Amino acid sequence: MPQLAAIPAFTDNYIWALHDNRHCVVVDPGQAEPVQAFLETTGTRLAGILVTHHHADHIGGIDELLMMHRKQYPTAPPLPVSGPSDSRIPQINHIVGEGDSVALAHWGITFQVLELPGHTLSHIAFWNKQWLFCGDTLFSAGCGRLFEGSPAQMQNSLDKLAQLPGSLLVCCTHEYTQSNCHFALQVEPDNLKLQQWSRQVRELRSQQKMTLPVTLADELSYNPFLRSREASVIDAARQRSANTGQPAPPIDKLVEEPHRVLAVIRSWKDTA
């Protein structure tokens, strides 16, 4: 079975890698150079690329990696690049969507695909019984900005993730955890699990250690964007609306339509 590794890129990105002593599959390679260095260090051969969405810091290294692969293995079949149907990612040669799967045959494992519109309209995630590669939809104690989708779409996407096994390791692609915890504590200052995680994150980051991956079960206990149905988060959204002079929907409306809560706290986070 493969091991999981995080390859740092840019200032706060992680390119996730599954690898053994022969093969390596990477997720969202925004830069080629760190991946090339990892392949050389581990003595592995790139066997595939998984892509969650079209943003440059997730796909910017694909062309160079494909070129490198063709140069090193000129008679090999094309490198499989699996990702969403999106003309902005022309390198994809294996288009996948909701309900599809991606088999990594050399390890005998299969990833299921979820469509997660919100951060972008064509965003997807890959998951199996161990790992969830969720791109920029879900972060530890946070979620992605709504660049293309609506709050209702993001709410539905986060609800899909919330239904997955709690034991899954959430492999998101940015080291945003410390700033996310700082904001989340404004939403739920009395959340003991969040307080504990925030202290742990501060200690990890003070030692320049990464805070990821995290379990989905833990995220459900302190991530406000997964908790839009919780009374404490609803109350915080109503108070935020009042403080900014926005009319707050009736409490029963917020309970029935949690995307309204998400919209308030996402807008709050955007200006925090």
Image: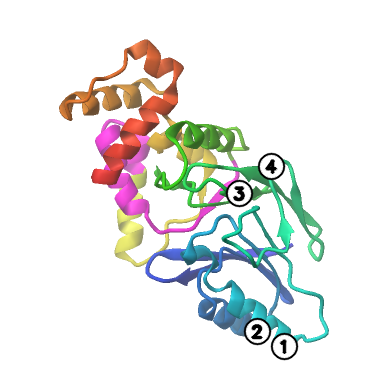
Whichever of labels 1 and 4 marks the residue nearer the N terminus, that label is 1
- Reply yes or no: does residue 126 show up in magenta: no
Determine if residue 158 is in view. yes
Secondary element at tag 4: loop
Left or right: 2 in relation to 4: right
* Disc 4 residue type (three-letter): Glu
State the residue at coordinates (60%, 42%). Answer: 167
Q: Position of residue 89 (x, y in %)?
A: 60, 62
* Disc 3 residue type (three-letter): Ala
Total numbered circles: 4
- The residue labelled by disc 4 is 98
Kindly indicate the quadrant of the structure image that contains residue 240: top left
Q: Residues within 10 Å of mark 2 (few under 14, many from 20)?
A: some
Whichever of labels 1 and 3 marks the residue nearer the N terminus, that label is 1
- The residue labelled by disc 2 is 68
Residue 125 is marked as 3
- The residue labelled by disc 1 is 72
Q: Is residue 180 above or below residue 260?
A: below
Q: Give, as a single range, the part of the protein colored magenta.
A: 167-196
Q: How crowded is mark 3: few (under 14 residues within 10 Å), some or many (20 or more)?
A: many
Q: Nearer the viewer, residue 104 or 99?
A: 99
